[in-house]
Image (cartoon, grey):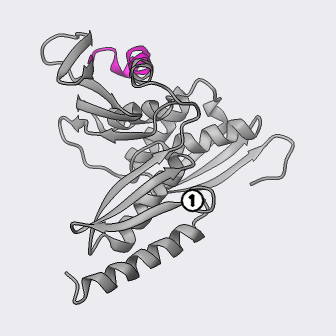
Amino acid sequence: MFDNPAIQVDEVIDRLQAAFERDPWINLHSYPVEFRSEDGRLVMDGTVEHVAAKRRARVLAESLVGQHLSVDDRLRREPVEKQGDRQIRDKVMDWLSMESMFLEYTLGAETGNRVETIRDSGPGSHEIIVHVDDGKVTLKGSVGSLTHRRVAEAMTWWVYGCETVENQLAVMPDEEDSDDEINDAVRIVLEKDPTLDADQFHTRTSDHVVQIEGLAADDMMKKYAVMDVWSVSGVWDVVDRVSVKGSEPA
């Protein structure tokens, strides 16, 4: 893989560190990230400020070192407030069970090797199983579309105690992804967020980069809208063109 692995791994880690320092979504000063090489993998470890920093870190790592090393992303989002695993699991189940997109889905909560069925939608239905371990939420099972997969993950990120999400949901039947698919999911997630007026925002997606425009009522609503976009898997970067009422355009 490398003529001199030790030296070249150090070099790619140095480049990655520099890229993180330049990226506007990542704050290494307040949220340092540890990089190390481990069994042919680049390990990223630490706490990041928000889902945007976690997404962006993964994108940068895969673009800069992905040809040489697989990326082991162990970064966790700093939780808005600490929650127990049971609380996190129950809140994720609440979001999914109330969402109309999943009304015909079987839902289950996994603890250890035991799965408790929360809702049984009968034979042949898609199933989402939620497992939580130390703030890490794993989504297992199958969904009917890429949009369902993305919305389930985005809603999981909305839960305050959730620090990271591993989305293992299989799409059945398989679908081809595209910018239009990503943009459709972004629009739906914005519409599903009860804190937002989705009609105030417009998005377009090109090469996995989403531009969001619009007018937010205040800085908090602007942040929610932008983080909703970042919560959609497949988004590599976000161009924030959202203005706040009474302030200059972004």
For disc 1, the marked residue is 26
Q: Is residue 216 above or below residue 99?
A: below
Q: Tell me the SS state at disc 1.
A: loop
Residue at left offset 60%, top offset 45%:
226
| Left or right: where 51 falls relative to 71 | right
Q: Quadrant of the C terminus?
A: bottom right
Instruction: Estimate how packed mark 1 is, as few (under 14), some (14 to 19) or many (20 or more) residues with alpha carbons within 10 Å.
Output: many
Residue at left offset 61%, top offset 39%:
225
Q: Is residue 213 above or below residue 207?
A: above
Depth check: 79 or 155 in front? 79
Depth check: 137 or 179 in front? 137
- Chain part drawn in magenta: 93-108
Q: Is residue 172 above or below residue 36?
A: above
- The percent coordinates of residue 241 (x first, y second) are 67, 53
Residue at left offset 21%, top offset 18%:
115
The residue sitting at the bottom extreme is: 3
Residue 103 highlighted magenta (yes or no) = yes
